[in-house]
Amino acid sequence: MLQLTRSDSLSLHACFSEIDEDGSGQISVDEFLNYVDVEMTPFNERVFGIMDEDGSGEMDFREVSMRQWTEIRIEEREREREREREIVPSRPCVLKILFTNRVFLP
Ligand SMILES: [Ca+2]
């Protein structure tokens, strides 16, 4: 069972809805790449395929939540370290950070 905070869940759902442009409840590769503003390339399609655990060609909220849960745990550790250094980061859409900064950078 995922242990996302209410704030994390609301933030994640808002991000998911923003990416899911047609409101289908699934994120297609087109919607995903459009959201992170990257071109459709074989490499980026493969990255999407890694996140599409069941191979359906789209990501559902569960798949995004599982990935986000892992990311939140990593972020919490990073924030703890930053607090120790008395640096308080802002909290933009963590999903976008994941997809734009961590997945697609070489
Ligand atoms: Ca969709």
Image (spheres, rainbow, N blue to C red):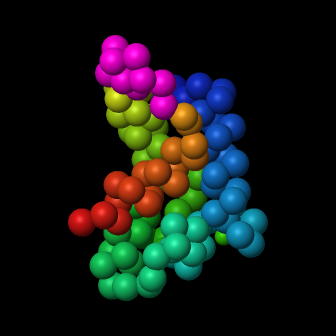
Total numbered labels:
0
Q: Report the image quarter containing ligand 1.
A: bottom right
User: Foreground: 3 or 36?
Assistant: 36
Where does the magenta region start and end?
79-89
Q: In the rendered view, would you say 72 is above or below 39?
A: above
User: Foreground: 54 or 26?
Assistant: 26
Asked whether residue 28 is drawn in magenta, I would say no
Residue 59, given in percent of the width and then of the height, sits at 53, 63
Q: In the rendered view, would you say 78 is above or below 95?
A: above
Image-based side of 49 in relation to 5, left or right:
left
Q: In the rendered view, would you say 77 is above or below 60?
A: above
Asked whether residue 87 is drawn in magenta, I would say yes
Using the rendered image of the protein, determine whether residue 65 is visible from the camera's viewpoint: no
Q: Tell me the quarter of the image containing the C terminus.
A: bottom left
Q: What residue sits 42% from the left and 23% below the top?
A: 87
Q: In the rendered view, would you say 92 is above or below 82?
A: below
* Residue 102: quarter of image: bottom left
User: Foreground: 41 or 61?
Assistant: 41
Q: What residue sits 58% from the left and 46% below the top?
A: 93
User: Foreground: 61 or 97?
Assistant: 97
Residue 73, given in percent of the width and then of the height, sits at 39, 30
Residue lying farthest to the left in this orientation? 106
Image-based side of 84 in relation to 95, left or right:
left
Using the rendered image of the protein, determine whether residue 8 is visible from the camera's viewpoint: yes
Residue lying farthest to the front in this orientation? 86
Q: What residue sits 37% from the left and 85% below the top?
A: 41
Residue 20, given in percent of the width and then of the height, sits at 67, 65
Q: What residue sits 57% from the left and 58% below the top?
A: 60
